[in-house]
């Protein structure tokens, strides 16, 4: 470990650490523009010049370009270095507009800071300033090229780091221009990060432009709840409105970046039609009145029909606090345990995944980046867990091999081998791989013995054999393989099979190697708190139909969003004596509930979530609840109606309201939420000691539990040759519930396509982007077809998109006969 | 008669044919190689002993560069012949191609063999299209003759040369930018480490040499290192050098002379002396990115070491001569116009600093100069040395030397509020 | 669209290259030869041939001096404006050309025959002042010589190569 001296302070750093980084560890922030921890050194801006006094380098050198070495003595305050840096600033300001007051970056601009701190205050350059034309880059990002200082961060992020190919440097010399070939939306689902990494105001967040200066914002370390990864963010609010989400560095989860879903989903919290007033039987009521009404009617039903007639419904966007409280009250009241998952298979697979993960097996997203071979099964990374795609790309950039086994037409910003097979085949492939690998292992352990060939696990296509053999070889040859497994489209036993393979790899390579992707931001927490076997929402529907359930308390959940049979759902809800809904979204359930109890978003009340690798992350509220000032005053400011109460300010966190509905009051029971959580699950006891922005994992140590593979009969692959198996899938935009409410995302989203394989499409005379109509149980679905050769045959991939009435599907799993798919007349 | 090595087959207005080259001893070294006379290490050793230094401008010892290819370096390996030649004043590489292309081709094969490369790219600038066509034709002839391609002359060495036409930019001549250009990327330089000889084209070991450097190889191997060293007129020098003389002399052109030939002799005997009415004021001794060299140094020996001993650089040995009627502020402005235009745009000192300098010079030349521009120019021509590659420091050389040797001339512009010279028309 | 034969040839050449991207400039030259300049359409066609995105190719096209992204005349006259030529009469060459052609630097004649653009040193400093027309170099320029060259080009007779 080289030891060096910077500004008279000694420090020892790992081999390969740049001097700029070593200085930062000492708390010395050497000015920089092009250097960025995630993007590395570029040596372009020359802003990080320092004086090397002793050691292998002498004189003025760029601290971002030189590895710390033994015996170096470096001065960052040397006069020559300071003067040179001032010169660099003058050069950069030569062409930079002097209009900080109208620039949205003002107040959070690196160039502003370093111009001031560098001491460049007087313009000497007598010439004119260079100007550029700006481009339209889509709904998310504004472009003001005149502000560019040519640090090349944007192109290095966009192309090298993220792997997208439609934004980069053009032209030469002092005309270099960063943009697209022509105007148009940026193709990368990670483009929003340009806003964060650009040190000036070239790229700014259109959704928050001109809303506030950074110093006016309430900025809080926050957490993304738009998929199961749980990326770290910074949320900013002003005037009771969330105005901006930025990425926050997280060593173990997302690194420096987030995806555009995570960045631009926030407007759901500001919706004008958000439920702000409690309602009882269609009439506005105070929260207290509504709580009383709900409480009374639920107790009534409990008394008349038994507590069993009351069911709780929640979702995986509920915080751990809410889920713990619901568990507590359901137990104490005897109500049915909350159903969190929409479908039994999701509940089952999530539970299996969670129960198979332990401390030694689980890899974090950061660790995934150093894998040298990755087998991803039943997952379409960009769409289901966007930042996973970026992590996989980093592994790919370090020459990792990647195999994706999935029926969908997967596309991702890295090269991979696509084994396009139907969901039913994935588990079998995994088993065969595990068997072959352990057989090889046994053979090499007991050489000389007759080689045992593993039997194929199930009837699999012959052409798969060589690909499986290839995967086995690559797993064997790799130092650090990782298995990534999705839980949405795979069969029930697939998570277990992935875990079996991972366990074997752990024995062979002694490194963590299992990464699950779960259905939602708090799926992990939900199954930790669930009774076993858990119930899903479809069980609840059945119980309503059978008259066993008479009242529903639906907490932050919208079954209309994800229950595949809309008609049946409506019929069931109509049978209820009481439908009470608690939510912060204007959902369909809220629309038809007898009693509506508005709740706070996480921005307003904070909360804890457990991501897909068992990491408990807790955040504080960003701002106090209430109707945004500009909605109260009709945009005018200051508000013209004066009162001592914050309009809409009586709303509370769902868990508080739920406690009250169950008859607890804070004063009387003096219950601390942390205590409830700890009592509901011992793993949560640590929540007490953990400050926000720190996290811990609730994973068992290895070896506590032998793997219990519940034998569940997987659904076989459909036999009939004349049907397509429906595979319902998530999509980057349009399927995730919260972001679906974001106007900016709605504008940016593209038309959803239903995909089928060319060989399935051809006999039907369907070509790519043709309109087709599919006759579903609940009626016809008109949609554009995507036709691809890069996907499995025999499947019909339907996104659960908010613009598609896929809820006409009827009972799932579904098979669609070819005869029910045809080209539509529509053009 | 002076020893003519690279130009030994020079014919008036004609290109030496492959047969003529062979008759003069050409491709004999290649035959020896095919026969197994030399190992790659032998070639490196001999060329090292001969003291061959790179002719592309930096004067880096050729064999040292080759030997920095790691012994266990990956394959395939590549050679890139640099015929970008966009340094103003320089045209020796063009002459070489038009005089005796096969000495170049054989040189490339030898260098390729020395580093165990299987492929070479000949990188040529677009304004040399006629040269490119000659090369394409002669490469095909060499291929027909079995000098290029699979199993050269029946040996187990295979090697081919691919001609790559540049899109045209000065920075493409910088070795690492050239590699990016060849790979179809933006031709920005790439600071080592890793060195191209370790990770160059597509991350494989790659050697970049100037074409004149390469053309020397057949002759060194044919005649031995001692002979080669003996060609030079200085102790530390070796071989001959192609000098390009342009500007206010009677016979501008390209001549091959022993390394270390004194500047005065080059100008007077080989360039016909100054034109009538012209008096030597200064010259750029090695292309646009060298410092102005003044009268008092006319006797300097034109060799890498001798020039650097007096604070100058041999560069590309392109001597551009200015007379007493030429405004050096104007010349410097012209040069900066070139450098600012050709900056690749990667780093701040060059991308922004050079246009700044150009602007100040323009103001001085056009009567808008101010006294305070002089210290600004001086400081900035120092500061651009901290650029990413050698382009900006090269650009600073004429500016810095203008202020060092011709400060009075600059001040005169400022005082008169106009250029004291009649602009050359 | 470029002719099928040309496209096929370029695809074949690209397939022969070790990496398709090496061919980016060659393919642009070929399409420029066909279209006269690289229109947006040409850029898209070329990008497809070398397996790059239009933006990636644009990064190169706009970097290089000899790829024209705007229409140019049939003959692109590029007058050397670097030090030696500048000293030896660049300005009078440009003056003569602008008055003969009736256009300024950077312009194209109305008949689409000539464009006039400066260029940096073309490596013919021993024959300064010099210029390049398409691929041919003309040195030691005088007004008379320029007139003869323009005459020849304008009347459609093949330009006599100087080199
Ligand atoms: C801006 C710049 C332009 C250059 N142009 C050329 C060139 O046109 N031809 C050349 O051979 N070397 C050129 N060089 C030098 C090359 O970087 C490199 O040193 C040379 O090609 C190596 O060959 P050599 O060792 O045989 O001299 C240039 C360097 C710089 C910094
Ligand atoms: S646009 Fe921003 S990130 Fe990109 S080069 Fe310019 S200043 Fe840097
Ligand atoms: S990857 Fe998931 S958690 Fe991360 S920012 Fe995107 S949606 Fe949010
Ligand atoms: S000095 Fe900088 S901008 Fe100039 S050519 Fe070199 S890398 Fe490019
Ligand atoms: S931060 Fe080091 S050169 Fe830009
Ligand atoms: S200066 Fe004009 S050709 Fe070199």
Image: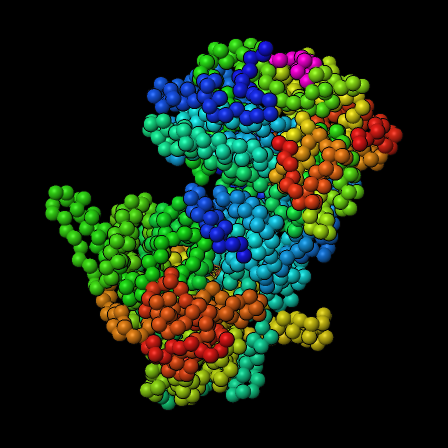
Camera-nearest residue between B171 and A219: B171
Camera-nearest residue between A687 and A74: A74
Residue B411, placed above or below residue A731? above
Residue C157, placed above or below residue C5? above
Residue A662, placed above or below residue B184? below
Camera-nearest residue between A155 and A257: A155
- Find residue A775 and report its image quarter: bottom left
Residue B90 rendering spot, x and y as whole percentages: 63, 27
Q: Residue at x 26, y 74 (%)?
A: A720
Check if residue B269 falls in the magenta segment. yes
Q: Residue at x 54, y 38 (%)?
A: B165
Magenta residues, start to end: B260-271
Residue A339, placed above or below residue A524? below
Give left or right: position of A427 versus A2. left
Residue A25 rendering spot, x and y as whole percentages: 53, 40
Check if residue B383 falls in the magenta segment. no
Note whether residue A282 is visible: yes
Q: Residue at x 50, y 50 (%)?
A: C6
Note whether residue A14 is visible: no
Give left or right: position of A98 versus A500. right
């Amino acid at each position: 470990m080289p030891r060096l001296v910077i500004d008279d302070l000694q420090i020892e750093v790992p081999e390969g650490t740049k001097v700029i980084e070593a200085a930062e560890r000492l708390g010395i922030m050497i000015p920089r523009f092009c250097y960025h921890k995630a993007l590395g050194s570029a040596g372009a801006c020359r802003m990080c010049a320092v004086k090397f006094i002793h050691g292998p380098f002498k004189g003025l050198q760029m601290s971002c370009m030189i590895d710390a070495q033994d015996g170096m003595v470096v001065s960052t305050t040397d006069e020559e270095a300071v003067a040179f840096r001032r010169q660099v600033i003058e050069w950069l300001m030569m062409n930079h507009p002097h209009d900080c007051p109208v620039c949205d970056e003002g107040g959070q601009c690196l160039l502003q800071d370093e111009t001031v701190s560098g001491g460049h205050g007087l313009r000497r350059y007598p010439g004119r300033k260079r100007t550029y034309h700006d481009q339209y880059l889509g709904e998310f990002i504004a472009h003001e090229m005149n502000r560019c200082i040519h640090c090349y961060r944007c192109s290095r992020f966009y192309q090298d780091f993220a792997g997208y190919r439609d934004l980069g440097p053009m032209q030469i010399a002092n005309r270099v221009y960063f943009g697209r070939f022509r105007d148009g939306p940026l193709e990368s689902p990670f483009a929003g990060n340009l806003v964060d990494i650009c040190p000036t105001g070239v790229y700014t967040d259109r959704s928050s432009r001109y809303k506030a200066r950074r110093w006016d914002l309430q900025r809080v370390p926050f957490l993304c709840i738009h998929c199961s990864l749980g990326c770290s963010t910074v949320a900013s609010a002003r005037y009771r409105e969330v105005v901006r989400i930025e990425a926050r560095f997280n060593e173990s989860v997302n690194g420096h970046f987030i995806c555009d879903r995570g960045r631009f989903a926030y407007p759901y919290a500001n919706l004008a039609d958000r439920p702000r007033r409690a309602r009882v039987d269609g009439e506005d009521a105070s929260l207290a009145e509504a709580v009383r009404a709900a409480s009374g009617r639920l107790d009534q039903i409990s008394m008349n029909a038994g507590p069993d007639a009351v069911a709780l419904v929640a979702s995986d966007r509920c915080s751990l606090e809410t889920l713990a409280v619901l568990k507590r009250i359901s137990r104490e009241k005897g109500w049915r345990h909350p159903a969190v998952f929409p479908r039994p298979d999701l509940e089952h697979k999530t539970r299996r995944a969670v129960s198979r993960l332990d401390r030694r097996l689980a890899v974090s997203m950061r660790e995934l980046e150093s894998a040298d071979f990755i087998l991803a099964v039943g997952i379409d990374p960009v769409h289901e867990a966007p930042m996973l795609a970026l992590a996989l790309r980093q592994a790919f950039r370090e020459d990792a091999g990647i195999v994706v086994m999935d029926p969908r037409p997967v596309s991702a910003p890295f090269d991979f081998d696509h084994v396009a097979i139907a969901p039913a085949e994935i588990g079998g492939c995994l088993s065969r791989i595990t068997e072959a690998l352990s057989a090889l292992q046994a053979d090499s352990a007991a050489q000389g013995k007759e080689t045992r060939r593993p039997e194929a696990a199930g009837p699999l296509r012959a052409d798969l054999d060589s690909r499986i053999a290839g995967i086995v070889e690559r797993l064997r040859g790799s130092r650090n393989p990782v298995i990534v497994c999705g839980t949405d489209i795979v069969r029930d036993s697939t998570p277990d099979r992935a875990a079996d393979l991972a366990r074997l790899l752990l024995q062979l390579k002694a490194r963590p190697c299992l990464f699950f992707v779960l259905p939602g931001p708090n799926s992990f927490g939900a199954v930790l708190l669930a009774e076993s076997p858990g119930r899903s929402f479809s069980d609840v529907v059945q119980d309503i139909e059978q008259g066993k359930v008479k009242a529903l308390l639906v907490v932050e959940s919208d079954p209309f969003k994800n229950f595949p049979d809309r008609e049946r759902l409506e019929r069931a809800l109509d049978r209820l004596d009481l439908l009470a809904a608690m939510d912060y979204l204007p959902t369909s359930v809220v629309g038809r509930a007898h009693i509506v109890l508005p709740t706070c978003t996480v921005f307003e009340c904070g909360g804890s979530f457990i991501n897909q690798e068992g990491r408990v992350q807790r955040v504080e509220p960003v701002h106090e609840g209430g109707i945004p000032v500009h909605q109260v005053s009709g945009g005018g400011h200051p508000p013209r109606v004066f009162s001592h109460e914050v309009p809409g300010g009586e709303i509370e966190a769902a868990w508080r309201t739920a406690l009250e509905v169950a008859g607890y009051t804070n004063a009387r029971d003096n219950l601390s939420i942390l205590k409830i959580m700890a009592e509901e699950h011992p793993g949560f006891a640590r929540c007490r000691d953990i400050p926000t922005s720190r996290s811990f994992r609730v994973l068992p140590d290895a070896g506590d539990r032998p793997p219990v593979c519940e034998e569940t009969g997987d659904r076989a692959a459909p036999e009939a040759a004349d049907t397509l198996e429906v595979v319902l899938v998530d999509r980057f935009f349009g399927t995730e519930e919260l972001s679906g409410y974001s106007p900016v995302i709605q504008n940016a989203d593209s038309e959803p396509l239903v995909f089928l394989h060319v060989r399935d499409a051809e006999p039907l005379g369907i070509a790519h982007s043709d309109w087709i109509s599919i006759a579903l149980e609940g009626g016809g679905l008109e949609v554009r077809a995507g036709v691809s050769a890069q996907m499995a045959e025999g499947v019909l991939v339907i996104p659960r998109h908010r613009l598609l009435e896929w809820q006409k599907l009827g009972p799932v799993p579904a098979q669609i006969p070819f005869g029910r798919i045809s080209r539509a007349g529509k053009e | 008669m002076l020893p003519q090595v690279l130009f030994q087959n020079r014919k008036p207005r004609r290109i030496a044919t492959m047969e003529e080259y062979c008759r003069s001893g050409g491709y004999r070294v290649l035959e020896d190689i095919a026969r197994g006379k030399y190992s790659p290490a032998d070639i490196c050793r001999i060329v090292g002993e001969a003291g061959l230094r790179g002719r592309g401008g930096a004067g880096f010892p050729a064999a040292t560069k080759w030997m920095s290819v790691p012994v266990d370096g990956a394959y395939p390996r590549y050679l890139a012949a640099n015929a970008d030649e966009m340094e103003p004043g320089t045209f020796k590489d063009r002459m070489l191609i038009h005089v005796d292309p096969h000495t170049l081709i054989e040189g490339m094969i030898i260098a390729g063999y020395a580093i165990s490369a299987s492929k070479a790219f000949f990188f040529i600038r677009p304004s040399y299209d006629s040269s490119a066509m000659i090369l394409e034709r002669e490469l095909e002839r060499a291929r027909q003759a079995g000098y290029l391609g699979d199993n050269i002359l029946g040996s187990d060495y295979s090697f081919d040369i691919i001609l790559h036409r540049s899109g045209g930019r000065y920075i493409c001549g910088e070795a690492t930018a050239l590699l990016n250009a060849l790979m179809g990327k933006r031709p920005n330089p790439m600071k080592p480490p890793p060195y191209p000889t370790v990770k160059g084209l597509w991350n494989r070991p790659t050697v970049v040499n100037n074409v004149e450097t390469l053309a020397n190889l057949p002759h060194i191997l044919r005649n031995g290192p001692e002979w080669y060293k003996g060609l030079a007129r200085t102790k530390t020098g070796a071989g001959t050098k192609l000098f390009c003389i342009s500007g206010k002399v009677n016979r501008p052109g390209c001549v091959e002379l022993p390394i270390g030939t004194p500047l005065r002799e080059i100008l007077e005997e080989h360039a016909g002396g100054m034109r009538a009415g012209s008096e030597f004021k200064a010259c750029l001794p090695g292309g646009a990115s060298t410092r102005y060299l003044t009268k008092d140094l006319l006797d300097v020996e034109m060799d890498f070491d001798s020039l650097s001993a007096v604070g100058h650089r041999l560069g590309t040995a392109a001597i551009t001569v200015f007379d007493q009627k030429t405004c050096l502020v104007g010349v410097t402005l012209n040069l900066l116009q070139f450098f600012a235009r050709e900056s690749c745009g990667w780093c701040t000192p060059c991308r922004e600093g050079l246009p700044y300098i150009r602007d100040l010079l323009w103001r001085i030349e056009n009567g808008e100069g101010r006294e305070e521009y002089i210290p600004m120019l001086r400081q900035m021509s120092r500061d651009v040395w901290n650029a990413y590659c050698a382009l900006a420091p090269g650009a600073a050389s004429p500016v810095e030397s203008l202020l060092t040797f011709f400060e009075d001339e600059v001040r005169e512009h400022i005082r008169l509020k106009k250029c004291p010279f009649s602009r050359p028309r | 669209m470029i002719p099928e034969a040309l496209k096929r040839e370029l695809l074949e050449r690209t397939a022969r290259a070790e990496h398709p991207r090496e061919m980016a400039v060659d393919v642009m030259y070929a399409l420029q030869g066909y279209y006269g300049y690289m229109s947006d359409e040409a850029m898209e066609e070329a990008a497809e041939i070398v397996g790059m995105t239009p933006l990636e190719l644009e990064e190169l096209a706009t970097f290089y001096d000899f790829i024209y992204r705007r229409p140019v005349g049939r003959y692109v006259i590029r007058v050397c404006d670097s030090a030696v030529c500048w000293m030896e009469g660049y300005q009078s060459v440009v003056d003569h050309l602008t008055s003969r052609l009736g256009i300024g630097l950077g312009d194209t004649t109305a008949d689409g025959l000539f464009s006039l653009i400066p260029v940096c040193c073309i490596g013919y400093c021993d024959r300064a002042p010099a210029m390049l027309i398409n691929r041919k170099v003309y040195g030691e320029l005088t007004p008379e010589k320029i007139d003869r060259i323009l005459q020849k080009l304008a009347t459609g007779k093949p330009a006599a190569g100087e080199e």
